[in-house]
Image (cartoon, grey):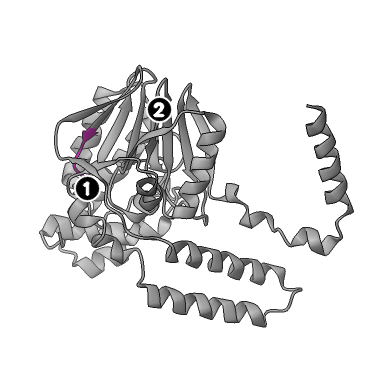
Amino acid sequence: MRTRIFLLGVVSVLVLSLPRTAQLEVPTHLKADDNFTLSKVTDGVYAAIAKSGGLASGNAGFVVGSEGVLLVDTFFTPTAVEDLLETIASETKQPIKYAINTHYHLDHTGGNQVLTARSVPIIGHENLIAWQTTKNRRFLPATEELQKRRSDAAKQLSEIPADQADKRTTLERQLKRFDAMLAIKLTNPTVTFGSGTLHLFLGSTEVILFTLPGHTGGDILAYVPSANVVFTGDMGGRKTLPNLVDATVNDWIPSLDQLLSKYPTAQFVPGHGAVATAAEIREFRDYLFDLRARVQQARADGLSLEQAKQQLKLPDKYKAFAFQNFATPNVEDMYKELVGTKAK
Ligand SMILES: [Zn+2]
């Protein structure tokens, strides 16, 4: 203890005595804790809530049992999941026994390679074997393209004078993001199932995995009975608009009704947004229901897809949701689903 106090003293003297410029060399925005916020849901159950603009992009979480840890999702980049593994190691000495991928989207599977390198089994829906390394190309530009964007950003940065700190910060952030994306190697799960339930035991702590259709057709959720917590992946969101690129809303609404009737008092760790109550998951479900009703009405009124995209405005009650950029694509995806022209 005496050594630690002594060291702290030395560190603070060092920090205080650093010249101003040297302190600025470690900008706070580049610190690891900018990727996610750790939130303790209840004893042994944690949510890692992605921070906007960081390298996590989607939420993850973990369950600490009496014998081992379950990791739920691997974020968008290896860098971000490495940060999370460090955080887990500071909370518990238990090893990571299993990881799961709630669905294939890159913001939930981009760090898979870090887990396979540690020989941790990754459990996912059986459709991920076909989708993880193929469909994710839409979220991950080719290496040459990323390298080009990186060198463009590096060139711009070299031309910006030191006194324009904001511009430099933005570009430094972009460079860090490109580097993190260049490190991604699309990696499949190693254990899959397609229906029913899978029971994992972390010593005496049980976690039940199950599937529900709606968001991608390859989603799994995790329920921790002893804690009454559900990890929903992107099947659930808290005050966020969803990405409907792979969705079947006609399946999704009944799936959420089923989830809410089965777990009416649970806490929910969603794929995006903070830890949610059942009422907040219902609000997300109601967004999907309203969207479908508005698009059905537009079709009944004879609106074309283009007219619907222009005329349907997001209702005021959803204007504070994150990802407002999805509002118009949501109309388009919903319209195509109803007409039957949505690409599978
Ligand atoms: Zn996501």
Q: Amino acid at mark 1?
A: Ala
**Front-most of residues 97 and 250:** 97
Up the image or down, 342 lies above or below 108; here it is below
For residue 68, the mark is 2
Q: What stretch of residues is rendered in magenta?
A: 210-216
Name the magenta segment's main secondary structure.
loop
Q: Amino acid at mark 2?
A: Gly
Quarter of the image holding residue 311? bottom left
Q: Is residue 334 visible?
A: no
The answer to whether 341 appears left or right of 190 in the picture is left
User: Where is residue 227 shown, x and y percent of the image?
Assistant: 39, 20
Quarter of the image for the N terminus: give it: top right
Closer to viewer: mark 1 or mark 2: 2
Q: Earlier in the sequence, mark 1 or mark 2?
A: 2
Q: Along the line of sight, which residue is nearer the eye, 96 or 306? A: 96
Residue 136: mark in rendering: none
| Residue wearing tag 1 | 293
